[in-house]
Image (cartoon, helix red, strand yellow):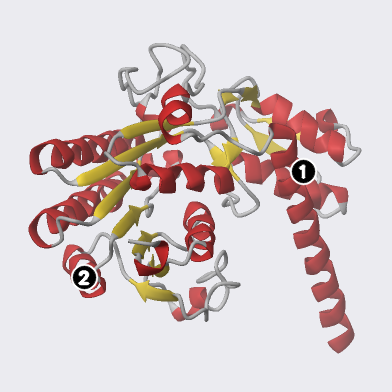
Amino acid sequence: MNNRNKIAVITGVNGQDGSYLAEFLLAKGYEIHGFVRPISQKQATSNEFINIRHLVGLPQLTVHHVDVADEKSLKKTICEIGPSEIYHLAAQSHTPKSFEDSWGTFQTNTQSTLAILSLIKDRMPSAKFYFAASSELFGDAVESPQNEHTPFNPISPYGISKVAGFYLTKLYRKKYSIFACSGICFSHESPRRGEIFVTRKITSTAARIKYGLAEKVFLGNLETRRDWGYSGDFVEAIWAMLQHRSPDDYVIGTEENHTIQEFVERVFDYLGLDWKRHVVVDPSLYRPAETNPWLADATKARRILGWSPKTSFKELIKMMIENDLEVVRRELVRDQNECREG
């Protein structure tokens, strides 16, 4: 089967990873069916297709409004499409929010995974399945770096929900011979990252500070270390998992880690600003201290999939801050135009 005969479902297609994956698969000739959550008309005017506006209208892309927590609707829509590959990316992925809405987190992250796996088993056993796991599985990591054999030790409802999804994926692969893979992806960022996440919070606020529209950015522990990569690189690893001859689970990361302070310093240096004048450490934003830093050991992905990241930490930061500078410039132009019209 060549790529032009392949039909892929991407849940969460309007998210960061979903939008990059859609671009990647469209370039390879896939027919894409992207799932986005049903939202109100007010929301639809601004954010419904925020990351895929440039793709909407292409004949190879069909967008479906599907609540992945609605098992009946989820199964019905997938059955009607009959995909050859399913990329299950939709998730409630903000760790602090998972404490506020633990039940909703499990409905979205775990129940939907089980629904799709059971559908594949019963109705479309030849379909390939990808589950978006997370480095949050490791939580308070028992060792560093972390690989596919590192014990899980999650410390949030989000992490626990992803552990459950990981083991469901593994169970259905072993018991029912489904081609099902999990990608244990470490932190991956881009200009399309939501502003509730710390990296985009830093770059978007710094851009506003540069233009005099903000003065401070409030952050938690600056010594927290993360393995940050570029989402556009990670989706290539995700695709490669489903093209391999046999299904398996893979850790995906850059094998480098950096502190939040280093990220801050590089962003503010790029803008010619003194970060110490603008960054406020807020203890209420601290997360529990980690015994061992999060750091990917992606040896297996390199060896078996032939994957390695292409984008450096420095390039990632430049990409994100340049995007947010342009966002602010557009806001200023729009405000000026509205003033003239007023």
Q: Which residue is mark 1?
A: 318
Q: Please, is residue 238 above or below residue 118 in the view?
A: above
Q: Position of residue 215 (x, y in %)?
A: 81, 45
Q: Position of residue 4 (x, y in %)?
A: 41, 68
Query: Identity of the amino acid at label 1?
Result: Lys
CA distance separating discs 1 and 2:
41 Å
Report the side of 214 relative to 285 (left or right): right
Report the side of 65 relative to 323 (left or right): left
Q: Which mark is residue 73?
A: 2
In contact (CB < 8 Å): disc 1 and disc 2: no
Label 2 SS: helix
| The image quarter in which residue 305 lies | top left
Q: Position of residue 96 (x, y in %)?
A: 44, 39
Q: Quadrant of the C terminus?
A: bottom right
Query: Identity of the amino acid at label 2?
Result: Ser
Report the side of 86 relative to 197 (left or right): left
Q: How many marks?
A: 2
Q: Nearer the viewer, residue 97 or 21?
A: 21
Q: Nearer the viewer, residue 290 or 148?
A: 148
Instruction: Give the residue displayed 52% in from the left and 78% down from the top.
Output: 58
